[in-house]
Image (spheres, rainbow, N blue to C red):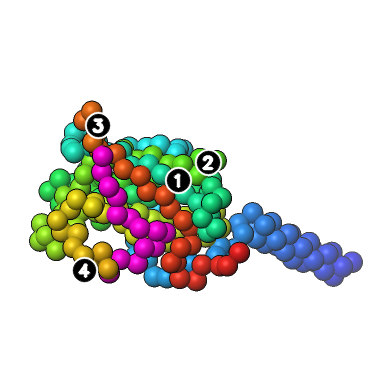
Amino acid sequence: MNSLIKTLLIFTIVLSSFTACTQQITDNPTHQTVGGPCQGCEALLEYGNRKLNSVDTIPGFDNFGPKLKISGKVYQADGSTPAANVILYFYQTNRDGFYKPAKGAKGWGKTHGQHRTWIKTDKSGSYTLYTFRPAAYPNRREPEHIHLTVKEPQTNPYYLDSYFFASDTLLTESKKRSLSNRGGSGIIELKYDKGLFSAERDIILGLNIPDYPIK
């Protein structure tokens, strides 16, 4: 009798474990691995419990200039279907060309600095970022830029071409030719109106991204 009870107990434990594993797989579907190596892309996941919106502002917007408004739409790989619920992670230098961390910074905030934020596209695929124009690195070897990492549902985070400014003298023809155009061109044209520069950039998911699944 004791042997039978032990057998039933073991069977119950094994069955419970199998059920739990099955539920975990169902709740957390396997993600597609795309985009190749990406140092720091895991920073995109550091928003924690923060509620993400399709419009957000990088810290420092109120204090620094020139002030920028960057907006656009994110599309599926076909280039026409709006992509909703896509997370965009932005980070940039300050006006001295440094990624200066906030006091008590944790995680990638120590490296990427305090001028960063996260946005989630709305049902039309739209996003809007308010920020200020970053400075070039002090050595002047790279044009001014805003980094961009993206995460679609059921994929790992991967990087896209940074935002570059067409008016930047450091953005040489040689530099333009070296860009991979991941997600489309990141070079933006600024327009000025009432104290604010604005620009648009649309993004096509999967465009020029290694290992992106063909749908």
The residue mark sitting in front, 2 or 3, is 3
- In the picture, measured across the screen, residue 91 lies left or right of residue 154, that is left
Which mark sits nearer the N-terminus, 2 or 3?
2
Which mark sits nearer the N-terminus, 3 or 1?
1
Q: CA distance from mark 2 to mark 3?
A: 26 Å
Which mark sits nearer the N-terminus, 2 or 4?
2
The segment highlighted magenta reads: 178-191
Q: Which mark is residue 73?
A: 1
Relative image position of residue 72 (x, y in whole percent): 41, 44
The residue carrying mark 3 is 193
Q: Nearer the viewer, residue 138 or 45?
A: 138
Q: Amino acid at mark 3?
A: Asp
Residue 75 lies within the magenta run = no
Which mark sits nearer the N-terminus, 1 or 4?
1
In the image, what residue occupies the spot 45% across and 46% down? Answer: 73
The residue carrying mark 4 is 174
Q: Nearer the viewer, residue 150 or 6?
A: 150
Q: Nearer the viewer, residue 171 or 119?
A: 171
Q: Amino acid at mark 4?
A: Ser
Instruction: Find residue 141 and report its image quarter.
Output: bottom left
Q: Are marks 1 and 4 in contact (CB under 8 Å)?
A: no
Relative image position of residue 208 (x, y in whole percent): 43, 66
Image quadrant containing the C terminus: bottom right
- On screen, residue 190 above or below 142: above
In the image, what residue occupies the spot 87% across and 68% down? Answer: 4
- On screen, residue 34 above or below 94: below
- Mark 3, Cα crowd under 10 Å, few <14 / some 14-19 / many 20+, is few
Q: Are marks 3 and 1 in contact (CB under 8 Å)?
A: no
Q: CA distance from mark 2 to mark 1?
A: 8 Å
The residue carrying mark 2 is 124
